[in-house]
Image (cartoon, helix red, strand yellow):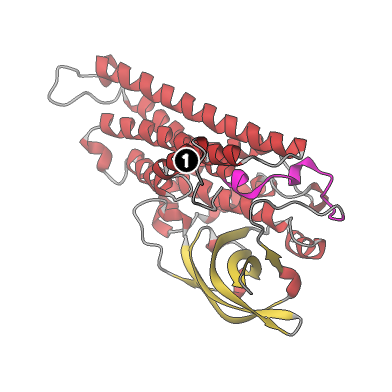
């Protein structure tokens, strides 16, 4: 179903309604929601594997789901009365843009919010939005009903077209005080009084958790590329060569083997990352700076390997693969888009990791 609706998703510039409905019916969006709100409160590994599997059918649907997972986790950090309001509706989905491009000013006991936020993935099918802002020199997250925002039709891209990652804006919006969450420097820990303070599930740290979530979809796209490759090697030859069946060519054997090794390596890095993040939460131990840098590098390098696997399939698929009705061209564009994301850019992540390994300052707060 995901694969069947992937083209429609891309053409619409947002995830097809049938896909949203199917994911919702299957309980996917409830995976990161606390059990006390009727959610699955699923194991982190299960969540990330689900993201990979969704991407195997539709990269845009998987990327939006990644954002909704992050948003649901972040909402559970708010006071119980706020989480009660959000999760009272089973179909609630929360988008998030943490970049502090908004301004929050006091207004009596509450606040006024003004700002503009780009790359708001999944906003079309979200019910709430978490937006980064600055208030008195601090960075905060502000929870806003999607209906209070203006969504700008400016998501015109070559990759992940179906994510609908449009810019949103708001001017002088009244925001209740309880919907504003301070943004700590490194980690969000629950106070002992919080309803979820005793639960392992809620003791992840923000940036390592984001890295774990982000590592899921790229692996799924590589698996989708491998699926395409193995399904089409019998139906085509290699033009201008003696091979009437691609399956019989030695180069095809080499390509198939290398694609599989890259996927296995990417999956191993993804799983190592998930194990580390979940383990720290279970032990209630803070990630060291080295572990934080490694988490970002694991996600980024897994993404690089995944994209390299997709590129091999693209090159092996011949000129016909650039046709818009051939899935590998969409898989390739989505994979490239993920590899260019600031959080998954391997060149940047490896530099940061290397600096930390050599005892230098990472020179970034994204850890």
Instruction: Please identify the quarter of the rendering in which residue 315 is found.
Output: top left
Residue 199 belongs to magenta span: yes
Say which element carries label 1: helix
Residue 263 lies, in percent from the top left, at 45, 27
Are there few (<14), some (14-19), or many (20+) residues within 10 Å of tag 1?
A: some
Q: Is residue 181 visible?
A: yes
Residue 204 belongs to magenta span: yes
- Residue at 36% x, 61% y is 156
Q: What are the residue bounds of the magenta stretch?
A: 193-210
Residue 356 lies, in percent from the top left, at 51, 40
User: Is residue 66 rendered to the left or right of residue 264?
Assistant: right
- Residue at 53% x, 26% y is 268
Please, is residue 141 above or below residue 232 in the view?
below
Residue 23 lies, in percent from the top left, at 61, 47
Residue 28 lies, in percent from the top left, at 64, 45
- Residue at 41% x, 54% y is 161
User: Is residue 28 rendered to the left or right of residue 226?
Assistant: right
Nearer to the camera, 83 or 53: 83
Nearer to the camera, 256 or 304: 304
User: Is residue 282 rendered to the left or right of residue 231?
Assistant: right
User: Is residue 106 rendered to the left or right of residue 67?
Assistant: right
The residue positioned farthest toward the right in the image shown:
193
Q: Which residue is mark 1?
A: 355
The residue positioned farthest toward the bottom in the image shown:
108
Tally of numbered discs: 1
Q: Is residue 249 visible?
A: no
């Amino acid at each position: 179903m995901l694969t069947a609706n992937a083209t429609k998703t891309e053409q619409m510039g947002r995830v097809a309604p049938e896909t949203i409905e199917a994911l919702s019916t299957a309980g996917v969006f409830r995976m990161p929601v606390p059990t006390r709100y009727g959610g699955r409160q699923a194991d982190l590994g299960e969540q990330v594997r689900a993201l990979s599997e969704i991407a195997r059918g539709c990269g845009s649907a998987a990327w939006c789901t990644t954002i909704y997972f992050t948003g649901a986790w972040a909402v559970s950090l708010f006071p119980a009365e706020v989480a009660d309001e959000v999760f009272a509706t089973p179909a609630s989905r929360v988008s998030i843009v943490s970049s502090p491009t908004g301004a929050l000013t006091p207004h009596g006991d509450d606040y006024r919010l003004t700002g503009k936020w780009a790359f708001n993935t999944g906003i079309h099918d979200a019910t709430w939005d978490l937006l980064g802002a600055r208030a008195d020199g601090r960075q905060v997250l502000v929870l806003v009903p999607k209906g209070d925002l203006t969504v700008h039709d400016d998501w015109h891209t070559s990759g992940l077209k179906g994510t609908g990652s449009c810019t949103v804006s708001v001017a002088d919006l009244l925001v209740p005080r309880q919907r504003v969450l301070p943004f700590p420097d490194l980690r969000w820990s629950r106070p002992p009084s919080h309803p979820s303070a005793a639960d392992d599930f809620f003791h992840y740290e923000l940036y390592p958790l984001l890295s774990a979530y982000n590592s899921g979809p790229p692996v799924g796209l590589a698996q989708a590329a491998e699926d395409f490759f193995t399904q089409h090697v019998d139906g085509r030859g290699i033009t201008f060569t003696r091979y009437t069946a691609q399956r019989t060519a030695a180069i095809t054997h080499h390509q198939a083997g290398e694609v599989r090794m890259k996927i296995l390596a990417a999956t191993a890095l993804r799983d190592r990352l998930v194990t580390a993040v979940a383990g720290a939460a279970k032990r209630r131990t803070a990630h060291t700076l080295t572990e934080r840098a490694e988490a970002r590098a694991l996600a980024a390098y897994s993404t690089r390997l995944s994209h390299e696997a997709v590129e091999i399939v693209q090159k092996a698929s011949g000129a016909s693969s650039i046709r818009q009705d051939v899935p590998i061209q969409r898989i390739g564009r989505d994979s490239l888009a993920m590899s260019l994301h600031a959080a998954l850019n391997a060149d940047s992540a490896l530099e940061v990791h290397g600096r930390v390994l050599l005892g230098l300052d990472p020179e970034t707060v994204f850890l």
